[in-house]
């Protein structure tokens, strides 16, 4: 058995510390050790985007990172979007514009869109499609997602 390593990180504003094998994937650490199961495991190869989180403020695939790589990092998962029982504006837009069906890709899509809107607060439809293209959705046809991101953009920009 490999030597256990200590991982200290902040997730959704809360300090956490855990011990794991050096080879444990970050997505597994988040789900199993921290109990935050909103981050989904899809392809396990960094292709589908279901596992996307914010790593030090930027979208990252947690299925192709090791937990030990997150030592000292600040992470945000889908669980951190809701505040005081109120949906995040992006979550609200997904609800209003039917931006999800089965919901499997939704956590990764939300985190990817959040990072995208941080860097491009007033995107065109083409830019939105390109910005979310890193997350695969098999259910929606993307139009509802695009509409949701477009609707959330001015709300998020106003809150800056």
Image (cartoon, rainbow, N blue to C red):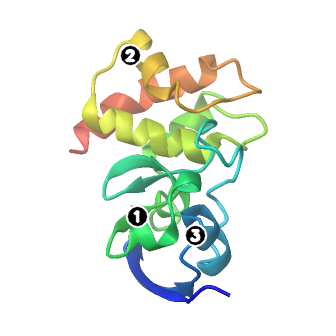
Work out whether 73 lies above or below 43: below
Dividing the picture into quadrants, the one containing residue 31 is: bottom right
Q: Position of residue 119 (x, y in %)?
A: 26, 34
70 left or right of 20?
Answer: left
Density class for disc 1 (Cα within 10 Å; few <14, some 14-19, many ≥20) is many
Query: Who's the residue at 61% across and 57% down the image?
Result: 39
Q: Which one is in front, 16 or 65?
A: 65
Rendered location of residue 70, percent (x, y): 40, 69
Which residue, as the protein is rendered here, is positioned at the far front? 1
Q: CA distance from mark 3 to mark 2?
A: 30 Å
Kindly indicate the quadrant of the structure image that contains residue 109: top right
Rendering coords of residue 44 (x, y %) = 67, 49
- Few, some or many C-alpha atoms within 10 Å of disc 2 (few <14, some 14-19, many ≥20)? some
- The residue that disc 3 covers is 30
Secondary structure beneath label 3:
helix
Residue under the point 64% across and 59% down = 38
- Compared with 51, 83 (above or below) is below
């Amino acid at each position: 058995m490999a030597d256990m390593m200590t991982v200290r990180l902040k997730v959704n504003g809360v300090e956490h510390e855990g011990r794991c094998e050096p080879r444990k994937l970050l997505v597994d650490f988040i789900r199993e050790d921290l109990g935050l199961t909103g981050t989904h495991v899809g392809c396990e190869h960094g292709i589908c985007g279901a596992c996307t989180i914010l790593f030090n403020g930027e979208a990252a695939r947690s299925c192709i990172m090791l937990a030990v790589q997150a030592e000292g990092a600040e992470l945000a998962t889908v669980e951190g979007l809701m505040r005081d029982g109120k949906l995040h504006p992006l979550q609200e837009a997904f609800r209003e514009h039917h931006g999800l069906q089965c919901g499997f890709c939704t956590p990764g899509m939300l985190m990817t869109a959040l990072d995208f809107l941080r860097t491009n607060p007033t995107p065109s439809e083409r830019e939105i499609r390109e910005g979310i293209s890193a997350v695969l959705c098999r259910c929606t046809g993307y139009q509802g997602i695009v509409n949701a991101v477009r609707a959330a953009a001015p709300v998020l920009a106003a809150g800056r």
